[in-house]
Image (cartoon, rainbow, N blue to C red):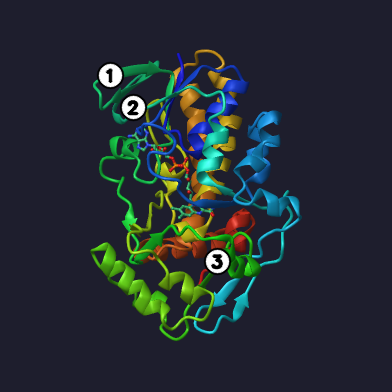
Amino acid sequence: MPVLIIGAGISGLLLAQRLRQEAIPFRVFERDADLTTRGAGWGLTLHWSLPALRSLLPDHLTQRLPEAYVDRTAVTKGASSSFPFFDLSTGELKAKTPQASESQRIRVSREGLRHLLATDINIEWEKSLAGAVFEPDSATAVFEDGSSIKGSLIVACDGAQSPARRILFPSQWETYKIPVRMLGVKLLLSPDQMQSIHEKDTFFLQGTASSNDSFVYISEIPDTNEEKRQFIHTLAKTWAEPFRTLALNIPVDEDIKHLTPQDFVPPRDLRTSGRAVLMGDAFHAMAMYRGEGANHAIVDVVDFVDRAIPLLREPQDFNTLRGALDDYEDAVIKRARPAICLLTLNLPVFEEYLMEYEAAKYRAPTMVNKTQQNAKPYI
Ligand SMILES: Cc1cc2nc3c(=O)[nH]c(=O)nc-3n(C[C@H](O)[C@H](O)[C@H](O)COP(=O)(O)OP(=O)(O)OC[C@H]3O[C@@H](n4cnc5c(N)ncnc54)[C@H](O)[C@@H]3O)c2cc1C
């Protein structure tokens, strides 16, 4: 029976690539009609997960990774991002990271990466998971179109709003809506208009405005597109060049998206029970400004294949398989939970984490894992 992968995002497609190499049967089901249904998407910085990504892909796809770079020409010339952070009011550079080589850090478009990962994978489109039925020797995925498909295991890679999480944990699935309001707009700029931005960094830059403290007072986002545009204008009038012109020139008809950052901190004891596991954002959604969600999703795949692949080659009794899935879930929660907790604005969860962290420190220092040792809670 095939492994049923729900969601053709980063983790789902990467897992499919690995299972394909291992000749383990699988099927991939995706809610959307194709890879571009929801627009081009965003850029992703991949850093600490790069060795994992390369280890999961066949050589010919690893070599094609540059196809997904946001600016392949710049990389060829040896450029790399230093993630500069500006005071938008003065234009002053406030901070930047050391440059990193292509082997240590890359910036890819999510769309480009998905296209690459979809190579040779048969994705079954417009198959939206609606339910699941588990038996000791099988898992059945039920779809919104009324069809159902039986497999050896359901791996739910269905993103931050994961319907699978809702099905598996009816009372624990909800994300925390982070009280930060964000607007996203895509601008098409001419090479001349881009030049001043490119001079600052070819790949990526960010900043806050010291004169109007934008981060703090963006607490309410206007409803209509025109009101959103005017709101951005109000903020941008105090900014220095080139940021000011960039924001003031947002075309009237450009759709300004309202983004709602959310997170899902998996409780320490969150464990699936039947033949199912969560993976990627479905397991541990985190705010995009953490810049790590995809990195964790990629390493989830490694943690899963290391434990489960030996058992998926032939039918296994439920308890043996479940033991491997429990190990996988332990590993993911240990790694991803501190990452989200250190950034969440969900104060009860943050406080609970601090207590865990403190307790671990005093209980047995030698058992504190590396992530916890390095973690410096900011309060
Ligand atoms: C603006 C922004 C910037 C980001 N920048 C970074 C960054 O720099 N670095 C980084 O590491 N991370 C970044 N992230 C986070 C990163 O995009 C996610 O963590 C990553 O895409 C998660 O991968 P995934 O496989 O878990 O889910 P996704 O890639 O979201 O894929 C989920 C898939 O499941 C499908 N699906 C949903 N419901 C169903 C259903 N019912 N049935 C079937 N299929 C379904 C969806 O259509 C989708 O294709 C950023 C996120 C945003 C929004």
Q: Residues within 10 Å of mark 1 (few under 14, many from 20)?
A: few
Q: Residue at x 63, y 61 (%)?
A: 202
Q: Disc 3 on helix, strand or loop? A: helix
User: Can you identify the residue that label 2 sits on?
Assistant: 127
Closer to viewer: mark 3 or mark 1: 3
Q: From the viewer's perspective, tell me whether residue 332 is left or right of residue 277.
A: right
Q: Residue at x 51, y 65 (%)?
A: 358
Q: Amino acid at mark 1?
A: Ser
Query: Can see residue 187?
Result: yes
User: Can you identify the residue that label 1 sits on?
Assistant: 147
Image coords of residue 102 (percent x, y): 72, 51
Q: Amino acid at mark 2?
A: Lys
Mark 2–mark 1 CB contact (< 8 Å): yes
Image coords of residue 211 (percent x, y): 44, 86
Q: Residues within 10 Å of mark 3 (few under 14, many from 20)?
A: few
Given residues 265 and 68, the one toward you in this image is 68
Q: Is residue 187 above or below residue 305?
A: below
Quarter location, residue 374? bottom right
Beta carbon of the mark 2 residue lies under 8 A of ligand 1: yes
Q: Is residue 200 above or below residue 264?
A: below
Q: Is residue 34 above or below residue 224?
A: above
Image coords of residue 58 (percent x, y): 67, 28
Numbered circle sitting on residue 193 = 3
Q: Disc 2 on helix, strand or loop? A: loop
Beta carbon of the mark 1 residue lies under 8 A of ligand 1: no
Of pointers 2 and 1, the one earlier in the residue sequence: 2
